[in-house]
């Protein structure tokens, strides 16, 4: 019987939370997998046997017999090629990925035929951003008869504990440019450019935010058929946000492409102790409703970004594990909606929506 759940990177920062959440529903069937069996065992000892350790190096050849009774894999590590994903889908194993890297996620979508022919379901863009941001954008768009533009903004707390991989990804994308679609035109955008003041509501007020290479903006233009989608990032510290915006404008952030400076920046972010553990997401959807120019605003705020990412991933994984879905590779918004995911998480995610006419 295929009933095992493998969490790759399961003893990492987000992986531990995913394992813990899933083990409440499937005790003894969840495996925290990774290269270090010692770290896996150390974490699993804290779960009273609900989570079990598994040594796994996805860069090496996998023992096929071990995977005959695996039902689903949740991937918490960044990958450089499709070898392991292709293996899972070819074995009829369902797959959930929390990666935020658009280039890799685009490659996963090329495995559509492999998933369909082997009765596998893969869900990508799972977490906060991408993930909840995709579902909020979908929800906002559904309030309109026609959606012309969506702006997504994420605020992260510098006092929160972010895993090293997440910090490395953020630092790497501070220094790089990326391509986005504006209707039929391709536009090249520099990281942390095009500053814009965003209204996060009465609790957080207005904050300056800058363009950033989150993958949601790349996929939503296709899945929701919206001409213009952009994503911006800011931090709870206005000083740090504006400092990075100024450094980007001067071209100094491009020096992060040099490995020593990049590694130094990663260490600085790891050691930052000021700020809060609060995060927030704001989605602004512009379009037409009842022949009127309309703005739909969606607000979400909370604490501990890793927890919301892990709980979204756990909810998706549990649904795929226990129910039947269409086979193939899907973005989160193609199989799930905001209400279903928000209500499945404990405590439920509280998202506020405001609709106003624009004159």
Image: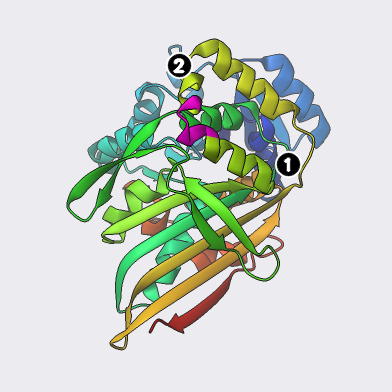
Q: Residue at x 71, y 62 (%)?
A: 347
Q: Quadrant of residue 348?
A: bottom right
Main secondary structure type of the part rendered in magenta: helix
Q: Nearer the viewer, residue 281 or 74?
A: 281
Asked if residue 205 shows in the view, the reply is yes
Q: CA distance from mark 2 to mark 1?
A: 36 Å
Q: Residues within 10 Å of mark 1 (few under 14, many from 20)?
A: some
Find the residue positioned furthest to the bottom: 290
- Helix, strand or loop under label 1: loop
What residue is rendered at 46% in x and 82% in y? 356
Span shown in magenta: 247-252
In reply to whether residue 251 is colored magenta, the answer given is yes
Which label number is shown at residue 307? none
- On the picture, is 246 further left or further right than 306? left
In this rendering, the answer to whether 135 lies above or below 2 is below
- Residue under circle 1? 160
Residue with the most extreme left position: 184
Q: Position of residue 254 (x, y in %)?
A: 45, 24
Residue 77: x and y in percent read: 53, 28
Q: Position of residue 70 (x, y in %)?
A: 50, 34
User: Callout 2: 10 Å neighbours few (<14), some, many (20+)?
Assistant: few
Q: Secondary structure at mark 2?
A: loop
- Precedes in sequence: disc 2 or disc 1: 2
Q: Is 253 in the magenta?
A: no
Question: Are circles 2 and 1 on residues that touch, CB within 8 Å?
Answer: no
Q: Residue at x 43, y 62 (%)?
A: 137
């Amino acid at each position: 019987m295929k009933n095992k759940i493998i969490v790759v990177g399961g003893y990492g920062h987000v992986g531990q939370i995913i394992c813990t959440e899933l083990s409440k529903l499937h005790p003894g069937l969840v495996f925290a997998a990774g290269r270090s069996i010692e770290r896996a065992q150390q974490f699993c000892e804290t779960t009273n046997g609900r989570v079990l350790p598994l040594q796994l190096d996805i860069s090496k050849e996998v023992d096929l017999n071990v995977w005959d009774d695996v039902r689903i894999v949740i991937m918490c590590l960044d990958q450089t090629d499709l070898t392991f994903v292709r293996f899972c889908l070819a074995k009829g194993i369902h797959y959930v990925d929390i990666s935020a890297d658009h280039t890799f996620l685009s490659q996963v979508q090329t495995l559509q035929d492999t998933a369909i022919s082997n009765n596998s379901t893969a869900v990508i863009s799972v977490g906060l951003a991408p993930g909840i941001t995709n579902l909020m954008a979908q929800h906002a768009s559904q309030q309109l008869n026609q959606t012309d533009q969506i702006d997504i903004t994420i605020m992260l707390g510098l006092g929160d504990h972010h895993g090293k991989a997440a910090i490395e990804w953020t630092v790497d994308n501070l220094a790089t440019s990326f391509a986005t679609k504006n209707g039929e035109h391709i536009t090249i955008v520099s990281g942390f450019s095009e500053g814009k003041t965003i209204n996060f509501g009465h609790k957080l007020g207005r904050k300056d935010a800058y363009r950033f290479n989150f993958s949601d903006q790349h996929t939503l233009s296709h899945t929701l058929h919206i001409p213009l989608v952009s994503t911006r990032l800011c931090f709870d510290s206005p000083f740090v946000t504006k400092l990075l915006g100024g450094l980007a404008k001067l071209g100094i952030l491009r020096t992060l492409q040099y490995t020593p400076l990049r590694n130094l920046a990663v260490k600085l972010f790891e050691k930052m102790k000021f700020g809060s553990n609060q995060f927030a997401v704001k989605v602004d959807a512009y379009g037409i409703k009842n022949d009127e120019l309309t703005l739909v605003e969606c607000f979400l705020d909370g604490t501990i970004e890793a927890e919301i990412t892990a709980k979204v991933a756990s909810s998706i994984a549990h649904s795929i594990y226990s129910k039947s879905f269409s086979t193939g590779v899907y973005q989160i918004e193609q199989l799930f909606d905001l209400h279903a995911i928000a209500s499945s998480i404990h405590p439920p995610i509280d998202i506020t929506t405001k609709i106003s006419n624009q004159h």
